[in-house]
Image (cartoon, helix red, strand yellow):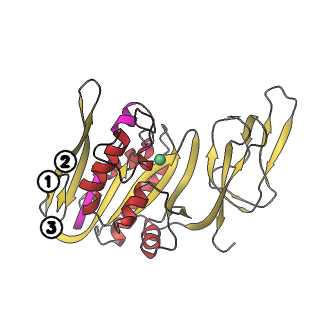
Amino acid sequence: MEIAGKIIAKDSFSQLSLDVARLPSRTKIDIPIFVRRAPEVGPTLLLMAGLHGDEINGIEIVRQILEQNCCDPLTGTVICIPIINIYGFLNFSRAVPDGKDVNRSFPGSRQGSLASRVAYHLMNEVIPAIDYGIDFHTGGASRTNYPQVRCVLKDKDNTYLAKAFNAPFTINAPLIPKSLRHAAAKLGKKILVYEGGESLRFDKVAIQHGVAGVKRLMGQLGMIQSKTPKRIENLIINKRRWVRAKNAGLFHASVHNGQQVHKGQELGFLSDPFGEFRTGIVAPNAGYIIGLNNNPVVNRGDALLHLGQLVGV
Ligand SMILES: [Zn+2]
């Protein structure tokens, strides 16, 4: 097996790095990669985070997996990349310093700008070696996502992996052009996205669900034999919509993330800062709150609550 230009022997632990580009100060920035390969053949699983550099819950999930013995597989190989977008991580930013989103830059180019180069090296030096992957994310800006796996429900491998991971929600999410998931799918590699919590905040529940999901998935793939975490109720969402602000003002939520709501239920209200108006926000359909905006100051059209509908409803 070859990863980042190095041959990885069976029954070994290797620390590698992707050499993408230097900082303007000439400092070399490497992307650390940790590979644990079992003596027995088996699947190769990629656990990666920080494609958006400010999404720290995923970084913590991969860190905990690295710290715990569960990433020593009995069969197959685990590749852990805790922080892909080191540049964004250093700047507390989703993007790379020129503002480009790495997850809209795949498959990338060796001669391209920074985001495109990060994508290129990942696609060419790591992805060819994998069978499956989990790409850990959080909500962007000040939005928080209830722990959820996003995948293509009509893809049997995707649903098998999502079922094994067993997050509170599994959400049908078509492939987005130029995303990692899309580029990897073209090579026949199955990558799921896990979303939990918000950027630049630790969310203990989202981290726990992420770590437990990885253990369940590794157990299902026969990579670990130790007792895997208990299964939880998993709800399958096939339709989702954002409930948006009809006025600018202050947003007050009256539901919590993950909550089941019925059609017409008041989800919160918008007010001005002066006590002169108050407008209720009602659920346009029944479903579950799968994402919530935590920033109370909103403009007209801003996303407030992400509402998911169950399959078949
Ligand atoms: Zn993200």
Please report whichever mark, 2 or 3, sits nearer to the chain's N-terminal start.
2
Viewer-nearest of discs 1 and 2: 1
Residue sitting at 50 percent across and 50 percent down?
Answer: 196
The magenta stretch is 74-101
Q: Are marks 2 and 3 in contact (CB under 8 Å)?
A: no
> x, y percentage for residue 59?
38, 45
Q: Which mark is residue 39?
A: 3
Residue at 23%, 59% in the rendered image: 72
Give the spatial CA distance, label 3 vs label 1: 18 Å
Which kind of residue does numbered mark 3 sit on?
Pro
Query: Residue 108: x and y, percent?
Result: 35, 50
User: Which is more toward the observer, 107 or 43?
Assistant: 107
- Residue drawn at point x = 35 percent, y = 39 percent: 113
Q: Which residue is mark 2?
A: 16
- Could you tell me which quadrant the N terminus lies in? bottom left
Q: Nearer the viewer, mark 3 or mark 1?
A: 1
Q: Residue at x 25, y 44 (%)?
A: 32
Mark 2 near ligand 1 (CB under 8 Å)?
no
Q: Which mark is residue 6?
A: 1
Q: CA distance from mark 2 to mark 3?
A: 19 Å
